[in-house]
Image: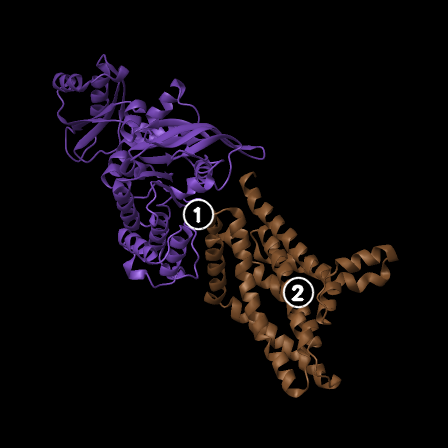
Chain colours: A brown, B purple
Amino acid sequence: MQNTLTIAGRQFRSFFNGATAYIVMAIVLMVLGFFFWQTFFLFGRATAREMFTWLFRILVFAVPALTMGLIAEEKRTGTIELLITMPVTDAQVILGKFLGVAGLYGIMLLLTLAYPMSISTLGNLDWGPVWTGYVALALQGAAMVAIGLMASSFTDNQLVALFIALTINLFFWMISLFLPLLPSELASIFEWISFNYHFDSMTRGVVDLRDVLYFLSVAAIALMVAFRSLESRRWR
Amino acid sequence: MNDVMIEARDLNKAYGPVHALRDVNFEIRKGEVLGFLGPNGAGKTTTMKILTCFIAPSGGTAKINGADIFEQPIEVRKSIGYLPESTPLYPEMLVLEYLEFIARMRGFRGDEVKKRIRTAVEQTSLGDVISKEIRALSKGYRQRVGLAQALIHEPSILILDEPMSGLDPNQASEIRNLIRSIGRERTVILSTHNLAEVQVTCGRVLIIANGRIVADDTPDDLRDRAGQASYIATVASPESGYRDAKFETQVSEALTQISRVKTVKKAEGDTSDELQFHVLPKDNHDVRADIFKAAVDGGFVLLGLEKTSEDLGAVFRGLTTGDVSESTAGSRKSKGDADAHAANEERASQADSDENTSEES
């Protein structure tokens, strides 16, 4: 556990040692501001629901940018060898990396609290759906960070990792847009697979255990694959 | 418990169809500084990665300090300090931050972290750069950070993969001294393709080629075993500033007449008033007395007589480029001519020269 936290801490700080954390956070907040305030006053409703929708879309792109280097870059520079030959298990390495990015992701979510706070000064904001929305974002984030970590473990090229993670994220998102084209039996399955289906119900203010389990399962599966992928170096 | 620190048994490693290691066996005892020598791609790095549990062998196993690499990888890693090839470090971290990270990973907390860092920094003389970013350091300093990192938990075993490659002669010599001082209390394995380095730093050499161990000896014994002794006779020219071909033939013939001499060759290294001859005796006889008598009888003046043996370089080439059977003896001898001198020069400047280091890409 200690080792996991040490790895997580280093990973977290490394985002701030370079410019990565600042750039990604700045872009996320700027893009969010641009899209959110464009329509907010048109609707004239004191709700944060639109913010969650936009944030979801932006993070689909932003999270792979944070995770792409996690393992790929360490493989490229060779630091992975030093890290793994410390007295740690591969699982601790994967988990530490995961928590490190999750920490940064959490900070990003905290910064977006400015939105509901601003909205509440403009009108009578119902905070219930706001909190469930953040739960949704947190779960969604766990899944996407795990997917990004998995993608990063496949390669020693950051851009390839970015592309793989983005493709997977877009698949889980866009799949909901193509439902009308699918036969109805398949459509219900694919709807259930998509991120949106589970995400949207939570931003409406309902936290269903099934939705929680969905995101946690996606995260767990991606982490397992990442672990196996890291471990496979031993046998190749 | 005996003092065998590393015990490798029948290590095999196949990368797909490529056999990187074949039945590698060795034991390393406490306090040994072992040089792992071989051309690029011979299996040095693979062996080190197996010993540090980074990769698993396809066959065989190894015990480090009594712990099996398959069953107790964490125990194995605890007793090893490892510096991988080309010293991978996190460039964006400060030296101090980095060492702190390593100390924590090694399980130290609180004051112990500071204490360990202080000791390692002193050992590697990193004091001046402790608050610099790693990316801003020179190659020599990075190498020292890598060593500090490997030393922080005072491991009983140090595994260093090409610790001196890419350093300039001064830096290499500093690192070499550092390794020697560290090696006094620990077991050290270092890999290299630089022969001069092994001769100076290591008490024992394992030569590996094509995934097999082809030699296991001390640098001196290795040289003696494979090295054919030969003699360089320096003869005064009859007339200074003038090379007489007839005189040369005359001396050459006189030397060849000696019954225990196999061949005589003109050696390079003449000056205006000296001629040098390379004399190879039969069956390693000492023919110095015979040469002296031949000089007296032939009426030429012997200025010098020197015994040489092949340097490690020739041995290395012989061992790693095909078999070392008798058939290569002839070709090796002709190489020996040119090498005899190079060897002397090399030994003179051995400590600070990196000439055998051909960088891999």
Say which element carries label 2.
Answer: helix
> Where residue B72 sits: x, y (%)?
46, 38
Does residue B355 appear in the picture of this structure?
yes
Q: How many marks?
A: 2
What is the three-letter code of the residue carrying label 1? Answer: Met
Residue A199: horizontal and vertical position, in percent? 71, 66
The answer to whether A2 appears left or right of A138 in the picture is left
Numbered mark located on residue A60 in the image: 2
The x, y position of residue A177, in whole percent, is 79, 64
- Residue B251 versus residue B243 in the image, above or below: above
Q: In percent of the image, x 64 and y 59: which residue is there? A: A143
Horizontal arrangement in the rendering, residue A197 relative to residue B219 (left or right): right
Q: Earlier in the sequence, mark 2 or mark 1?
A: 2
- Residue under the point 31% across and 53% down: B116
Q: Is residue B315 above or below residue A35?
A: above
Q: Please tell me which residue is depicted at 35% across the width and 27% down the height of the picture.
A: B216
How much space separates mark 2 and mark 1, taking CA atoms? Answer: 33 Å
Q: Give the quadrant of residue A17.
A: bottom left
* Residue B340 falls in image quadrant: top left
**Residue furthest to the bottom:** A122
Up/down of A131 relative to B235, above or below: below
Amino acid type for the residue under numbered disc 2: Val
Q: Residues within 10 Å of mark 2 (few under 14, many from 20)?
A: many
Given the current orientation, which residue lies at the most extreme top position?
B259
Q: Which residue is mark 1?
A: A86
Identify which residue is drawn at 28% across, 33% down: B203
